[in-house]
Image (cartoon, rainbow, N blue to C red):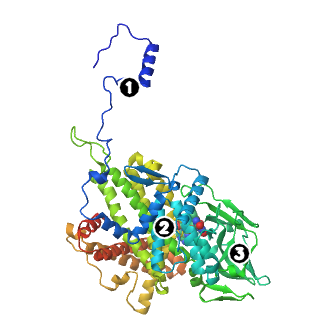
Amino acid sequence: MASMDTSNPPSAAARRAAAIARHLAGLSPRAAAAPVVERSACLSYTPPDSAEPAPAFSTLELRALLDGHHLRERDWVFGAMEESPLFCPRRRGGKVFVSPDYNEGKEGQREATMRRVGHLARRGVFRGWLTDPGAEAELRKLALLECLGIYDHSLAIKIGVHFFLWGSAIKFLGTKRHHDKWLADTESYAIKGCFAMTELGHGSNVRGIETVATYDSKTREFVINTPCESAQKYWIGGAANHATHTIVFAQLHINGRNEGVHAFVAQIRDENENVLPNIQIADCGHKIGLNGVDNGRIWFKNIRVPLENLLNLVADVLPDGQYVSMIDNPDQRFAAFLSPLTLGRVNIAVNAVYISKVGLAIAVRYALSRRAFSITPDGPEMLLLDYPSHQRRLLPLLAKACLMSSASNFMKRMYVKRTPELNKAIHIYSSALKATLTWQNMTTLQECREACGGQGLKTENRIGIFKAEFDVQSTFEGDNNVLMQQVSKALYAEFLAAKRKKQPFNGLGLEHLNGTRPVIPDNLTSDTLRSSRFQMDLLRLRERDLLKQFAEEVSNYLARESREKALMLSYQLAEDLARAFTERTILQIFLDDEKNVPAGSLKVHGLSSYKLMIR
Ligand SMILES: Cc1cc2nc3c(=O)[nH]c(=O)nc-3n(C[C@H](O)[C@H](O)[C@H](O)COP(=O)(O)OP(=O)(O)OC[C@H]3O[C@@H](n4cnc5c(N)ncnc54)[C@H](O)[C@@H]3O)c2cc1C
């Protein structure tokens, strides 16, 4: 330590002047003695890709398995984003990182989203999305939207509302006249569509909506009206700023009779984006996330739309006011009107898994470079991922994300090959997987956020902002809890049908219920616990027991209550059963997928380790 000369101490002013001089020269008080802060291992950074040994399997093969399809198209759309300043690319270490600026205000984010949509449209990303026929075209569209969703949730939702809600309603609820008039213009963004189903007073309970469309046979028009405040359309994506057209869900009244919920097309803005007369629009305001989407509220003051604007595949009104439908049962007719939501659910489920993967990639990479504490005197501090506790926090989530990838690919393949016979299964699987995969995404993101410590809170590091951006996935296009109730109700119906017809279970993977109860061995060795057979048996056993208990409980209540009330009172078993069904389904799909992977390193070192990490 240098000794101090105290015989003639400098004045305070002299000390301050010396400090300022040192500061201006860029030197700290100790700088003369120790000129540089030493580089510390805990602050050094080497990208894990170069510091860690290469994996024992091909990551390209793993990517092909997890992405499942259209790898080249995915890379192409990533390229289309990286090349444009609209996507805020930053180049570092030979890589391009793209991410929106979430620090922008609500209006700035909305306009940025719309400009990005414009860029993608000009690049031809949406070509054929509604007009190309066949499963291949649908899978391509889904692949591209998945990539856009990895970039930004608002971008994917803005596009999803336009194509998957407005576009699917025109395509699947409309007939040739609607297709001819609107599909091509939707694909080119000549018009911008939105989807007005939810109202302030009714969200999950769509059947209770209060907007009315009254048929006027004299003018062959429908008069659409918002009769009360609770009937205002609420949360409508695209309505606040940009949409020119909307699908309006309303109760159809003909000659004083209510025929139930139907879908109509209405224009809400002109080509200069001015709101049309007798339509009132307000903004839903700032949200906790998804601020790049302009959600709005809409009131209709007796606007008139022509008879042709009824989407008439399911039911039609003849000019004289006669109501005709190919579906007699009102419940089934109502269910048919909700069909555009299915594609949205499939996409939400897939998107949730991708976001879990992004969160996990960030958290695992951080854990491979961040060091904290040393367990030996003077030894280097440990990498976070070398802590068994940290592995335990992240790796089972990684395994689950990979299993859920298989499930989401299965769902997509089933959806694009849909037939009328598959509709029930598609509804059940898409409801179950949408709920489970989006809940799992939130659990994963929270763990990833904490695993990154304070850095997880920085918007720039993405995970924290993802929590706010993707939280809404559990609510829109079917609230998760309500969807899971529908799953257990459907399983109950399968149970009753099998019993009544004295026929074995067939479909939904329930065939295991036809066999004997799986036996759990008394002596549980480590090998047994890790075997696929044992894990599958456990999940099947749980599902079997819960279905039986649920059916018994409902039947007990039915002795004195209505069917609706009996199901409502059995909510706890209903929730447990729906979860048990979904988790068994997810494992079963993964094991089936695994069988199809050719023998090799991916099977041995990649997939088998996922099964070991499940908990
Ligand atoms: C950002 C955002 C964007 C949206 N975009 C659109 C859009 O473009 N178009 C559109 O039409 N809608 C849109 N929505 C609306 C969305 O679909 C609804 O919010 C959703 O259907 C839930 O309705 P709700 O908000 O009224 O909740 P509610 O139905 O009131 O549910 C509230 C809670 O009650 C529970 N609950 C409800 N019913 C039951 C029951 N029977 N048993 C037990 N519990 C129950 C639910 O689980 C939930 O937790 C959007 C919503 C948001 C937040």
Q: Can residue 488 be seen from the camera position used here? A: no
Q: Amino acid at mark 2?
A: Leu
Residue 189 figure quarter:
bottom right
Left-right relation of 580 to 85? left
The residue carrying mark 2 is 145
Please tell me whether residue 94 is drawn above or below residue 343 in the rendered image: above
The residue carrying mark 1 is 28
Left-right relation of 44 to 412? left
Q: Position of residue 440 (x, y in %)?
A: 41, 63
Q: Which mark is residue 212?
A: 3
How many badges with numbers are in the image? 3
Single out the mark in the foreground, 3 or 2: 2
Give the Cα distance between marks 3 and 2: 34 Å
Left-right relation of 500 to 4? right
Give the Cα distance between marks 1 and 2: 53 Å
Judge the density around disc 2: few (<14), some (14-19), many (≥20) Cα neighbours within 10 Å: many
Q: Amino acid at mark 3?
A: Val
Residue drawn at 22 percent across, 74 percent down? 521
Q: Where is ligand 1, by quadrant?
A: bottom right
Residue drawn at 28 percent across, 52 percent down? 50
